[in-house]
Amino acid sequence: MISRVADHCFWLGRYIERAESTARLLQVTRILAFDAELPPLYCWRPLVIVSGQYPDLAENLGAEAAGDGEAVQRYMTWAPDNHVSIRSSIRAGREGARSIREVIGHDIWQATNELYLWFMSEGAAAQYLNDRDEVYRNVRRSTQLALGLMRSTMMHDEAMDFLWLGVMIERLGQTARTLDMHHHIRGAAEAQQQPLLQSALWLSLLRACSGFEAYMRKQQGRVSGENVLGFLLFENRFPRSLRYCLRSALGLVKRLPSLGNRGVASARKRLDTLDHWLDEQEKSGVPSSEHALLTRIVDETGAACGELQGGLEGEEPAPAATQTQSQ
Amino acid sequence: MVHIDNTQAVRTATPTILDGYRAIPGTYDELVEAGGATRPHARMVGSLLANMSADSFARCQALAELSLAQRGVTFSVYSDDRGTEKVMPVCLVPRVIGATEWARLEKGLVQRLTTLQLFLDDLYGEQKALRDKVMPTDLLLGSKHYLPQLRGMKPPGGVRIHIAGIDLIRSPDGVLRVLEDNLRTPSGVSYVIENRLITKRVFPAAMDRIGVRRVDDYPTQLVERLRSVSPEDPEKSTIVVLTPGPFNSAYFEHSFLARSMGIELVEASDLFVSGDEVFVRTTLGPRRVHVIYRRTDDAYIDPEFFRPDSMLGVPGLMRAWAAGKVTLANAPGNGVCDDKAIYPFVPDLIRYFLSEEPIIEQVDTKVCARPEDCKYVLEHLDQLVVKAVDEAGGYGMLMGPTASAAELDMFRDRIIADPRRYIAQHRIELSTCPTWVPEERRIEPRRIDLRPFILTGKQGSWVLPGGLTRVALRAGSYVVNSSQGGGSKDTWVQAQADAAS
């Protein structure tokens, strides 16, 4: 396939997944902020920090905005200048779909376009004021529709591989960030000395990763921090765990044609190494602080993406150090 | 989409949208005769409208517009600096063309296309027609779109005009006339097909009863013809659509055509030329390209050959074309036929090349390059429509009868300064078609034109039954261009003539 189109496919997958994930995270954090008797700042600031947007938010809205649930939601949902807001993701996803309409087919394009038109409508703005949860649900439903249509209407060929690689890479990053965000919240909450709060936080983390029911079935209702972390990090049958996303991404990268393409080859090697490293982490037990582990995963994945894209653009991959995690 | 046409027949007491519809005096109306009776070939549409209330029509119209927005059937306007896309305005009242008239039109279009193809071959070859003085040599060679550097080059596959759009208008005497030829990159066919999808949903029974010829064949017909002109084995050839990119006004159409033909949509940066062969950059490495349906203008296809400042081109593409290694559809150099100063001579060209009389009439035209015509134009400026020969899209035009004194003076100066650039025609009272006017919630006559599309390959020419009917949505307007407040309508070509007509 055309290299430019492959790149568009990859990014379409990422934007759609990102819109879904951001909507879910906002939805879950709202509930957490209502329930957990935590000061709003402890709930909302970590969300902004792990999205990589805290400096931007602080500069434009003031640092105190990170403790204002309404301000954070507005910023992460609507802000056109915030390049990871739902609005930005939907817009970029729709632009991407528009430029490869002939590759993804009409149904997927229309699903993406309808989501965009609805999100930018007065109806969506009114719903945001009256029934916010439904706005986030709508975003998630529509993005999942697009993802489902991809799997069920497109050829499972190279274009699909690039699309799904984008989805998996984005999901990997989102799960890692969500875990990291909860790491921050727990740190703040420990000072509160409330045993029930800790348990509520673990459940919230599972919901933020769409893993509540899957986890509960596996552990038959037993909630412990170690188990939840182990589940989200290593459970290879749960489609949002780091292990699952990394393995899927690696499998897809291995299928990509790499004839004379150094970018693909080095991305493959990097993800392979990361996968082995994750195995070793599991063997040595769940880490007491997951922050370092998550940082490594996010950074290495970001570097692999840079190599892939460099390969598609026909350039030498950029040095890993220049890749940022908040693409 | 709601189906309304036989389920929501309104009672006689309810006013219908056709009540009180009258043609504009002195103008041909496509639906009704001067006395108010419905034209025989359009009876089905007449009774369809006579059974609809304003409410039910407005509902259908709103659904159609929503559907177009959701499907992303849009165009972008160059002057709009936000680069926003707009939905092509559509009016659901169809325009009907009778079977008998269409059969004649089809012959006339093929005749015209055949002639123009022969003329281009001759112009970029021996130039016999010029030596035989069929038209003034300086007029032709002075055309901005004549590319002397192409002389002697033959297009791979032999065809020059793979895709043509010929604009027709109907004068008050009921005669369809050619207004202009578009032999470069005529656009609009995607709207024809999208409009049909909408009317099929809204008026299924009426379409069935009238027997409307289908238009969804177009992509298949086009890709077969593009394949036929490949410089290599057609079955092993790679065909692509070349677009300037998502910001182009017709991007929707480029994507639509690639999608419906099942071929790849490429941008110039995806292509490169090596050893006079054209390649596309793929994830598996370079792949040879044989046929390019390019939707970029001549000036922007190859910076080596035309404009060095162009970012849109593929360096070396013209070399590959001249070497016979890649087919460009349409061939470079066709623009000379779109020159409005060449247009008046097409009937003579038909007589010269085919020894036939032109089947389709055209509009009487004054060429300001001829001193006697120029004198006439300057004396009758307030009665004429003046057009710059190398402008399209309704730009660079003077509507004499409605122009201000200042506009008349400005054009008078311009014509005197550069007569070669202008032609003039008496204003034709374009025919009208009933058109939905949302503010009034009723239908009123609005002026229309017609752009049929003609495809040509080694297997010969094929005319899309119907074409794009464009409509001037503003009351009293004659400008149908989508960039200037025009919309479109579905065009129904009757499959079989009925006994009465």
Image (cartoon, coloured by chain):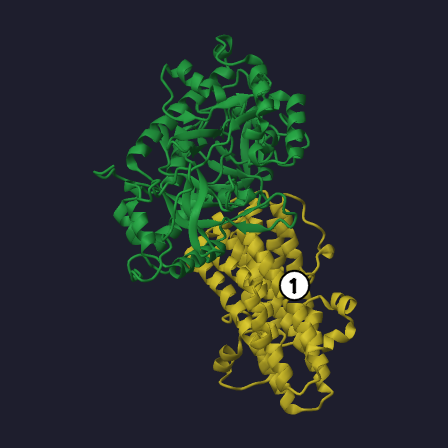
Chain colours: A yellow, B green
Give x and y (percent) for residue B458: 38, 26
Extreme residue toward the left, this view:
B499
Disc 1, SS: loop
User: The C terminus of chain B is located in which quarter?
Assistant: top left
Q: In front here: A169 or B138?
A: B138
Left or right relative to B303: residue B471 = left
For image coordinates 57% across by 53% down, the residue present is A95
Identity of the residue furthest to the top in this view: B131
In the picture, residue B215 is in which quadrant? top left
Local crowd size for mark 1, using a 10 Å CA cut-off: few (<14), some (14–19), many (≥20): many
Q: Can residue B465 be seen here?
A: yes
In the displayed structure, B174 sits above or below A288; it is: above
Q: Position of residue B114 (x, y in %)?
A: 40, 22
Disc 1: which residue: A84
Q: Is residue B314 above or below residue B488?
A: above
The front one of B139 and B242 is B139
Identity of the residue drawn at 43% across and 54% down: B442
Between A14 and A217, the one nearer to me in the picture: A14
Residue B332 image offset from top left, x and y in percent: 53, 26
Chain name for mark 1: A
What residue is shown at x 45% (from left), y 36% (from top)?
Answer: B430
Q: In the rendered view, tell whether residue B353 sits above or below residue A197.
A: above
In the rendered view of the protein, which quadrant contains the N terminus of chain B?
A: bottom left
- What percent of the width, then of the height, locates residue A244? 54, 67
Q: Quadrant of residue A15?
A: bottom right
Left or right: B432 in relation to A68: left
